[in-house]
Image: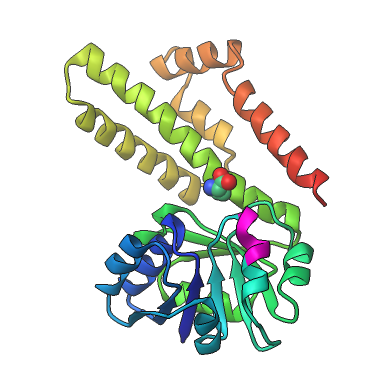
Amino acid sequence: MRIGVLGVGALTEAIVTGVQKSKSPYSWCLSPRSAFRVERLLSLPQVSVAQDNQSVVDQCSTVIIGVRPDDLQSLATQIKLTSDHHLLCLAAGVHLETLQKMFYPAKVTRMMASIAAEYPGASVFFFPKDLQLSTCFSNAGFGVQSFTTELQFEASMLSVCVNAWWLDQVHALAQTFADETGMPLAEAVELLARAQQESVTLLKERRQTTPTVLAREIGTPGTFTARGLYHLKERQAEKPWVDILSQLLKELKSKE
Ligand SMILES: O=C(O)[C@@H]1CCC=N1
């Protein structure tokens, strides 16, 4: 399959790299902007660059749209599409209906991913579900999750945001280890990465057990863990996280 990319940014660069380094690479045709990113991608097999945006859609029926939400309208006016085109749109917070009107008569699927798409084990998210796309990305080794409602799909975008917030927390905790024990920051980060890996293992292997019950299995009464859980609960450490998540969800809902 040949896939076009309109708007080569950090995220689309990660996706193309991840797919091309997988066991099931495809062929790609990139829009010509972002010269430094395009140059890096051209070093991968089966990646070419088109003269302009129209040439991308002329060569590919499946096209990933990676431009910013504010630039969608201007892109839509630059390209001539047919009903054979299938656009995978990465723009956060722009509704399917809006995209369908903007890019009529093309078929549109909303897509979300993070810059981790460059590495094995990353996931991509779709709305609505599309069997061909799911197969294409699972063949390339991605985890694929599709959603029955658009609001649930927005949660996949927020899960990418949560990861960034969490990475900031990890830094603060690693810095504390580094400051208090003298270990290099990189070693402290490695330690916490291993711990997170174990959280993921527990979440995956013990799906019948809720995360909070798992936490209490580690933090049985009288343990250091239990003291930490109590300390954090008493200060409602989860509150700012839950607050911003609900606020963003509210904003996304009000756009409906
Ligand atoms: O924060 C954003 O708007 C985008 C969507 C998911 C991650 N970054």
Residue 233, picture quadrant: top right
- Quick check: 226 above or below 82? above
Q: What colour scheme governs how the chains and residues are painted in the rendered image of this protein?
A: rainbow
Instruction: Name the one closer to the observer, 210 or 130.
Output: 130
Looking at the image, residue 107 sits to the left or right of residue 135; the answer is: right
Give the total number of marks visible in the rendering. Answer: 0
Image location of residue 5, percent across then percent down: 48, 72
- Residue positioned 35% across, 28% down in the render: 171
Where is residue 215 shown, x and y percent of the image? 50, 29
The image shows residue 113 at horizontal and vertical percentages of 51, 57
Is residue 159 among the parts visible in the rendering? no
73 is within the stretch colored magenta? yes
The residue positioned 55% from the left and 76% from the top of the image is 63
Relative image position of residue 167 (x, y in whole percent)? 42, 35
Q: Is residue 229 left or right of residue 167?
A: right
Q: Name the quadrant containing residue 183.
A: top left
Q: In the shown orientation, is residue 14 left or right of residue 66?
A: left
Instruction: Answer whether residue 73 is visible to the viewer in this image.
Output: yes
Query: Start and end of the magenta stretch?
Result: 69-74
Magenta stretch, main secondary structure class: helix
Depicted 128 relative to depicted 121: above or below: below
Q: Residue at x 79, y 65 (%)?
A: 97
User: Magenta span has 229?
Assistant: no
Q: Nearer the viewer, residue 224 or 148?
A: 148
Image point 47% across, 34% down: which residue?
166
Question: Residue 107: which quarter of the image?
Answer: bottom right
